[in-house]
């Protein structure tokens, strides 16, 4: 028996089939983070379009199923599971990955609904996140068996992030969610130390994206002294991984505003007190007032210009929402005159405040344009402001002031505050007119129209002096505007002197220029001298026919349309001797035609 067993074992060792069965299968490799980032950035998530990314995932899955011949039946759907034995190609792992991405993007799409998900939609959202966690866990388990160690670590971090996102959305098990986010962060920190530079940058960015979620979980557990302002600053960061965090922050802020809105019972404006009864109007007005505090607070000067413009856009949206709610209440008010009067007054007050903020935003745009007007352009791609653009901005400001003034003066009985506000609008309008006239003069000056520019500078100076007198006559002086008007008067005076002098110099040069032109005139045929040569005329000369790149002259390749040229014509023969030749009579040689009775009669008549 021992001899037979040794023979069998020797046969098994020599058998090539048994050798191939024990052979180690090759392991796949996927750069999971790079695959995820590139797919998201190229298909919608750069702009927060989760619906487009979900459509891309579905299309990608269809292509993968077709290329792998892993379809689920033609008529009736037959589910085919992806198991360890199924994964014979790296594309099977891509299928599992995109299934998780599709479920996650669908959940985030529901999270981005305009009014937020309702109870039913929230249940569906959580269900899609559970599905994403299921596929991410399957992806992690398959990668741990079928892929190399780096891919396995990335898949584990991906699954941990999905689990943390689900718990983050459910507002429960903050300790478990914190552990998931920390696990993912630890993996990416470790992977960021190796590989090429691009991979290291991606890992560091992912760590920065996970940090706000970790800090928020610590805040909810009570292990962090994070303030509300710090949370808001974190919410200003960008990235798909932070969208859920920002939605949480916004929901928390809305809840806080709803609680504060209970105390906002009236809206004060120019001595009037208008009751605010609708909770939606209260929340919108309270949100707008919070944004106004950011623009007018002590830290407003340190805010960058782009940030201020973003705050203005949010503020306008909040006030427009408030006005829409007020007007809907007016429609449903019926015949209650007292309620309608209060709502009309509130709508007028909110509209006036909105007009004031619009003027402030446009003044900020004017400030930005002025800073670019005299700046030397270092970069050729940088856009330089022209005076015409400032003229257009001041036109907008004048229109804003006129609309605001019309809104204020629309009431019957006006309080002293309203009259003072309307006078302020008139003063602003006069100052804006002076500025507009000044930049209009600049545009004429750049066009070489000296007389028009001189007249406009003089007019701008007159308007600026009138506006300065009005601003200095009031008790509460605006020192900033007064200083700007004084500077404008000085610039108007200096520029008008320059235009006057330049105009005189140009007038003096006119006879000299005319004499120079006359002296260059030649009696000879100047057409031959001025004749331009084209490319086809000088093929034997190495000279550019395109011209200088800085000029706008057309390239001289060939004359078009081509000039007329004389060509040889076929000779015309005029036979003038034909009528002078006597030809012989050949009638006797012609064959006589036989005829009938009538022909013989006609022949007899000719003979007679």
Image: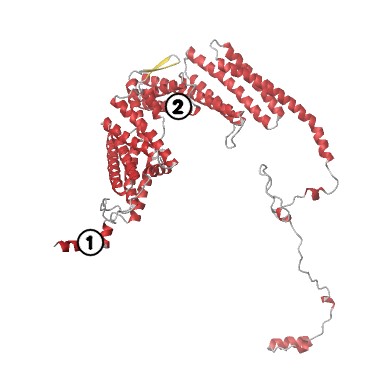
Say which element carries label 2: helix
* Circle 2 crowding by C-alpha within 10 Å: few under 14, some 14–19, many from 20: some
Residue 421 visible (yes or no): yes
Is 436 placed above or below 581 here? above
The residue where tag 1 is placed is 12
Q: Which mark's residue is nearer the viewer, 2 or 1?
A: 1
The quarter of the picture where residue 121 lies is top left
Place of residue 222 in the rendered image (x, y in percent of width and height, measured from the top left):
29, 24
The residue where tag 2 is placed is 311
For residue 531, side relative to residue 462 (left or right):
right
Q: Quadrant of the C terminus?
A: bottom right
Residue for point 59% across, 12% down: 472
Residue 330 visible (yes or no): no
Is 329 placed above or below 598 here? above
* Circle 1 crowding by C-alpha within 10 Å: few under 14, some 14–19, many from 20: few
Say which element carries label 1: helix
Residue for point 59% across, 35% down: 379
Place of residue 386 in the rendered image (x, y in percent of width and height, measured from the top left):
61, 31
For this rendering, which residue is in front, 294 or 240? 240
| C-alpha span from label 2 to label 1 | 77 Å
Q: From this viewpoint, which residue is outermost toward the right?
A: 523
């Amino acid at each position: 028996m021992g001899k037979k067993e040794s023979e069998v074992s020797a046969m098994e060792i020599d058998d090539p089939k048994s050798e191939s069965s024990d052979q180690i299968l090759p392991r796949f490799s996927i750069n999971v983070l790079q695959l995820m980032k590139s797919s998201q950035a190229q298909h919608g998530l750069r702009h927060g379009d989760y619906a487009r990314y979900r459509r891309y995932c579905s299309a990608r899955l269809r292509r993968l199923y077709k290329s792998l011949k892993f379809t689920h039946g033609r008529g009736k759907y037959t589910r085919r599971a992806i198991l360890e034995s199924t994964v014979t190609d790296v594309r099977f792992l891509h299928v599992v990955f995109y299934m998780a991405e599709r479920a996650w993007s669908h959940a985030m799409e529901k999270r981005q609904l305009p009014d937020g998900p309702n109870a039913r939609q929230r249940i569906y959202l959580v269900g899609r996140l559970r599905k994403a966690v299921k596929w991410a866990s399957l992806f992690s388990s398959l990668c741990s068996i079928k892929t190399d160690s780096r891919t396995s670590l990335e898949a584990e971090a991906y699954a941990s992030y999905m689990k943390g996102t689900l718990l983050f959305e459910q507002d429960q098990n903050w300790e478990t969610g914190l552990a998931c986010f920390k696990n993912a962060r630890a993996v990416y920190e470790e992977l960021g130390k190796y590989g090429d530079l691009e991979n290291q940058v991606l890992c560091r960015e992912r760590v920065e994206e996970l940090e706000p979620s970790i800090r928020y979980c610590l805040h909810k557990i009570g292990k962090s002294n994070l303030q509300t302002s710090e949370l808001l600053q974190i919410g200003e960061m960008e990235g798909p991984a932070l969208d859920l965090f920002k939605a949480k922050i916004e929901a928390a802020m809305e809840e806080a505003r709803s609680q504060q809105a209970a105390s906002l019972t009236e809206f004060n404006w120019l001595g009037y007190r208008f009751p605010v009864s609708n909770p939606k109007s209260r929340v919108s007005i309270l949100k707008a007032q919070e944004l106004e505090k950011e623009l007018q607070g002590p830290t407003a000067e340190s805010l960058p210009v782009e940030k201020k413009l973003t705050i203005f856009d949010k503020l306008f949206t909040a006030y427009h929402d408030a006005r829409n709610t007020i007007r809907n209440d007016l429609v449903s008010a019926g015949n209650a005159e007292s309620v309608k009067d209060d709502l009309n007054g509130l709508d007028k007050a909110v509209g006036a405040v909105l007009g004031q903020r619009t003027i402030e935003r446009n003044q900020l745009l004017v400030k930005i344009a002025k800073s670019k007007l005299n700046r030397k352009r270092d970069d050729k791609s940088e856009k330089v402001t022209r005076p015409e653009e400032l003229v257009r901005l001041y036109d907008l400001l004048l229109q804003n002031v006129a609309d605001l003034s019309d809104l204020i003066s629309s009431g019957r009985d006006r309080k002293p505050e309203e009259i003072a506000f309307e006078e302020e609008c008139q003063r602003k309008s006069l100052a804006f007119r002076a500025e507009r006239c000044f930049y209009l003069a600049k545009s004429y000056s750049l066009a070489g129209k000296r007389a028009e520019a001189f007249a406009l500078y003089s007019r701008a100076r007159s308007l600026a002096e009138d506006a300065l007198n009005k601003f200095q006559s009031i008790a509460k002086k605006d020192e900033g505007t007064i200083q700007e008007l004084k500077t404008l008067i000085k610039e108007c005076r200096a520029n008008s002197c320059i235009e006057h002098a330049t105009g005189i110099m140009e007038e003096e040069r006119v006879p000299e220029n005319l004499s120079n032109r006359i002296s260059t005139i030649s009696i000879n045929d100047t057409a031959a001298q001025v004749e331009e040569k084209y490319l086809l005329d000088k093929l034997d000369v190495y000279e550019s026919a395109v011209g200088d790149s800085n000029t706008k002259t057309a390239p001289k390749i060939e004359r078009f349309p081509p000039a007329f040229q004389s060509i040889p014509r076929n000779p015309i023969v005029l036979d003038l001797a034909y009528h002078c030749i006597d030809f012989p009579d050949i009638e006797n040689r012609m064959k006589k035609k036989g005829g009938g009775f009538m022909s013989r009669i006609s022949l007899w008549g000719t003979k007679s």
